[in-house]
Image (cartoon, grey):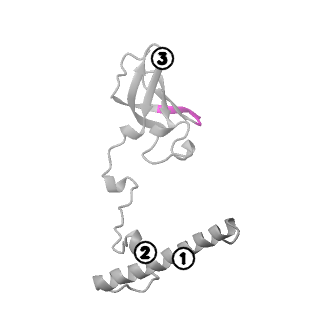
Amino acid sequence: MAEKIEAGSVVEGKVVRIKPFGAIVQLEDGGQGLVHISQIANGFVQNINDHVAVGDTVKVKVMSVDEENRKIALSIRDAMPKAPRNQQGFKPREHKNNYEPKAARQFADEPERPKDPVDDFEEKMKEWLKQSNERQAGINKRNNRRNGGY
């Protein structure tokens, strides 16, 4: 097969076929290898034809060589010079200064509660007693129905 080709080397080749899963590249020494769709470009590749065409000369990095099965894995993406992170199509994260905790958003429609802890406690106790009395009344009503009004 290809005795000159070693994993990690960057070589030139010509695209001879395009498949939905990748591109077949004819290497300089006569061997052929596959550039998988995930190795075509840095970003998401939906259609390989948007990036390469049959007859294009491309630089590829040899990812692996399987002599027994006569397969060579190639990468166009890894043969490209590395761009700084902010030029790889990533947009910088926008920091939100208007962040509000979930608890604060949940009670945004309610009027502001008193700041005095004693008043706040008394208000909570009144609300609790009201709910407790309502529950007890409901329980008594159900018991009276079950027992035939006794």
Magenta stretch, main secondary structure, is strand
Q: Quick one: label 2, few (<14), some, or many (20+) residues within 10 Å?
A: few
Q: Quick one: label 1, few (<14), some, or many (20+) residues within 10 Å?
A: few
Give residue 139's position: percent from left, percent from top.
58, 69
Residue at 33 percent across and 28 percent down: it is: 9
> What are the residue bounds of the magenta stretch?
14-20
Residue at 34 percent across and 67 percent down: it is: 95
Seen in the image, is 82 located left or right of residue 74? Answer: left
Residue occupied by mark 1: 134
Name the foreground residue: 134 vs 42.
134
Q: Image height check: is 67 above or below 106? A: above
**Is any part of residue 8 visible from this angle?**
yes
Name the foreground residue: 19 vs 127.
127
Q: Quick one: label 3, few (<14), some, or many (20+) residues within 10 Å?
A: few
Of badges 2 and 3, nearer the viewer stands 2
Residue type indicated by callout 1 = Glu
Residue at 36 percent across and 66 percent down: it is: 94
Whole-angstrom CA distance, mark 2 to mark 3, is: 62 Å
Residue occupied by mark 3: 70
Give residue 43's position: percent from left, percent from top.
45, 48
Q: Earlier in the sequence, mark 2 or mark 3?
A: 3
Seen in the image, is 73 located left or right of residue 149? Answer: left
Residue occupied by mark 2: 105
Q: Image height check: is 42 above or below 9? A: below
Q: Earlier in the sequence, mark 1 or mark 3?
A: 3
Give residue 131's position: percent from left, percent from top.
50, 76
Name the foreground residue: 115 vs 7.
115
Whole-angstrom CA distance, mark 2 to mark 1, is: 29 Å
Name the foreground residue: 72 vs 32.
72
Residue type indicated by callout 2 = Arg
